[in-house]
Image (tube, rainbow, N blue to C red):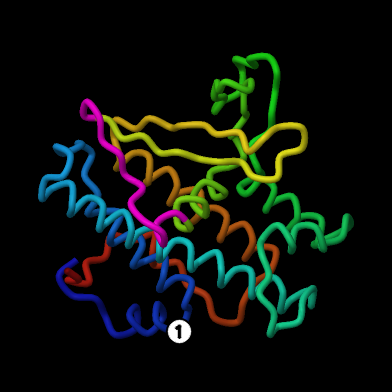
Amino acid sequence: MDHISDNITRDIICDQIDYRLTIAKHFLDKITPSIPKENSFEHFVLEANIDAFLFFSSSVIDMIKIEINDKFDLFDKENVFYIHGIRKKLGNLGIQKQVKDTIAKYFSVPTHEMLDLEARHRHIKTDQGYFDTTNSTLWELQILRNKVTHGKIINITDHKITLNFTIRGFKGLKNPKYQTTIENPKEYFLQMFNNLACFVKQIRLLNPQKTQSFHHTEQLDFKLE
């Protein structure tokens, strides 16, 4: 699209979640499917686009938390609260239960299994058993965003990227860790974005806002560099 109408631009600006999703998608579109040589200029550009994608994607979660809290008045608005805190405080009936279940679908801490359950979509083997990460895609997003603030997250070896995750506070185990190996970064982060967009849509069906738009689902070019 060569020109974005003023109406579409106004819609996006007025809905700050759509605004952040749109910019996250802009940086997602810049992430390449191929993996460059380590420490090359292409590596630099790839890491910059992934960092920007994670920043704007994570800010969507922060804003959704505020919308949920405004709806159900779970925490003092001046306090910092986390998605797991919201999940714990939500009730087990009605809309609150539906919101709680939706959060669990995307933000669950990986669950530990001693045996391999081959039927599970995202079942990862570690030295401490198997971990089911099926419902952990946005948990992984938050982990990566937190790590980005402290340093690099992209490790390239043999044209593959490894991402490391640590599960803290796991009962009975000492901070188990697992790795995800990526051969196509575009595909990995696209799946993450799609899960984030689905999460927003499902939450907003349960908790509609006076102002909301979904232009991030369209192919828009804001000429951002």
Vertical placement of residue 146 versus 75, above or below = above
Q: Which residue is mark 1?
A: 14
Where's the N terminus, which quadrant?
Answer: bottom left
Pinpoint residue 152: horizontal percent, then vertical percent: 33, 51
Q: Residues within 10 Å of mark 1 (few under 14, many from 20)?
A: some
Nearer to the camera, 119 or 80:
80
- The percent position of residue 91, horizontal first and vertical second, equals 87, 60
Q: Quadrant of residue 25?
A: bottom left
Q: Which residues are magenta?
A: 147-159
* 151 is within the stretch colored magenta: yes
Q: At label 1, which amino acid type do we have?
A: Cys
In the depicted structure, whether residue 212 falls above or below residue 47: below
In the rendered view, tell whether residue 76 sits above or below residue 111. Answer: below
Q: Give the side of residue 51 with respect to residue 177, left or right.
A: left
Q: Residue at x 61, y 47 (%)?
A: 106
Residue lying farthest to the left in this orientation: 41
User: Magenta span: helix, strand or loop, mainly?
Assistant: loop
In this picture, residue 200 sits left or right of residue 10: right
- The secondary structure type at the circle numbered 1 is helix
Compared across the picture, whether 218 is left or right of 74 comes to left
Quadrant where the C terminus sits is bottom left
Residue displayed at 72% across by 74% down: 69
